[in-house]
Image (cartoon, rainbow, N blue to C red):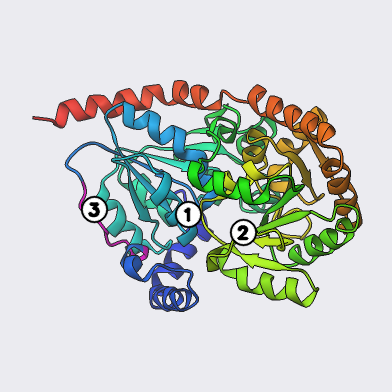
Amino acid sequence: MSGKGFLLSSYRTLTALLEPAAAGLLLWRRKRGKEDPARFAERRGYPGVTRPDRTLVWVHGASVGETVTLLPLIERLQRRGLVVLVTSGTVTSARLLAARLPPGAIHQYLPLDVPRYMRRFLDYWRPALGMICESEIWPNMVIEARRRDIPLVLVNARMSERSFRRWYKLPKASRYLLSSFESCLAQSQGDGERLAQLGAPRVGIAGNLKFDVPAPPADANTLAILDGLTSGRPIWIAASTHPGEDELVISAHLGIKPHLPKLLTIIAPRHPQRGSGIEELARANGVAVARRAAGEMPERDVDLYVADTVNELGLLYRLSQVAFLGGSLVPQVGGHNPIEPAKLGCALLHGPLVHNNAEIFAAFDQGGGAREVADVQALAGAAHRWLSDPASARQAARAASQTAAELGGALNRTMQTIEPLLMRVALGQRETGP
């Protein structure tokens, strides 16, 4: 345990002793629909598919946002002839990857951070290189990879001020874990400086990979049907909402409706299983509502459309003139990624609580493509102004799209930085090949 310090050693011991409790946690999560029953064993490190007998690179993102961010990187790695294993930790991300992962890439759930689970996972998959997205640094995962001499890279690395303050109180643990990475490729100068202060020895500034992700797809036939049903209506979407925001959006809808009688409001909750609850909330407020997961469509008499499905934001953004990004009017979330709606022609609205994507939102605000709204009255006012003045909304949407284009390039910088590691992987492949 040399170099890890007391805290990491204690964490290792505690998580090993609590393995039965971890199994119980997984069962509890499965009952609540948070685990996939058909792939339950993967969360304990058992493989769900057979490993190909070729050099394999492991790429990990926590949930939907991180895994979508990694898609262009996965494609680049595949072009190098590498098998790519993609891990994530949520059912929603697995569903999205099933639709968008390039052919040949493998998805598995990341095991819980229990020593035996991680040993089982790494011993079976034997990655030649691990690429971890943003700040998903699990101690046992890192320690077990280090024991096996698996080089790790932290890509699209993020270290917020809040996280920095927590890590700063644990200097030995943070230094040991971050020093286990061959390279930390930060999203911004601030992220890079904070990582370096915490002990990361090799930090580079690559920019944010999210700007290089292609706009999410949409089925052309479905889009044509919905476009026909909603033609001539002012439409806005509240995307990735959380509990506490749906009420605000419905209230904003009721404030705008008298001025724009044909208004259609779309709510796409971050967690689709909340769709029925949002429907009940709308009905309680006297709003005519339809729910997509129930097979219903936004007919002319529908005022609120609950889009409680997975992997359809590309479709919904294409229908909308204005997009409000959820997780920004409630605490603890930090705001969700505005880049996708910016690329798909939406003017952007967001609340003030965007610490997870603060620099991205600041860039859109400064470029004129986004506006901050402090409360429900401001949300209703800003949405109404853009929806009643389509020319102004189109101008803001163009500004948002331009900002997104200008901030791209992180993918190329990331690939250039990891090229020496990829060469080492290729060399090892030749040395161990037939």
Residue at image coords 78%, 67%: 247
Classify 158 as above or below 96.
Answer: above
Residue 198: % across, % down: 61, 41
Secondary element type, mark 2: loop
Q: Which residue is nearer to you in this view: 385 or 130?
A: 385
Counting residues from the start of the chain, the first of labels 1 and 2 encountered is 1
Type of the residue with mark 1: Ser
Q: Position of residue 430 (x, y in %)?
A: 17, 25
The crowd level at tag 1 (other Cα within 10 Å; few <14, some 14-19, many 20+) is many
Q: Residues within 10 Å of mark 3 (few under 14, many from 20)?
A: some
The answer to whether 227 appears left or right of 46 in the picture is right
Does residue 222 appear anywhere in the picture? yes
Q: Which residue is mark 1?
A: 93
Task: Look at label 3 and name its amino acid.
Answer: Tyr
Question: What's the mark number on residue 270?
Answer: 2
Q: Is residue 262 left or right of residue 277?
A: right
Q: Which mark is residue 200?
A: none
Where residue 74 sits in the image (x, y, percent)? 40, 36
Q: Amino acid at mark 2?
A: Arg
- Look at the image and tell me whether residue 171 can be seen: no
Per the image, label 3 sits on a secondary structure element best described as helix
First to last magenta residue range: 43-51
Say if mark 1 contacts mark 3, CB within 8 Å.
no
The residue under label 3 is: 124
Q: Is residue 48 magenta?
A: yes
CA gap between label 2 and label 3 equals 33 Å
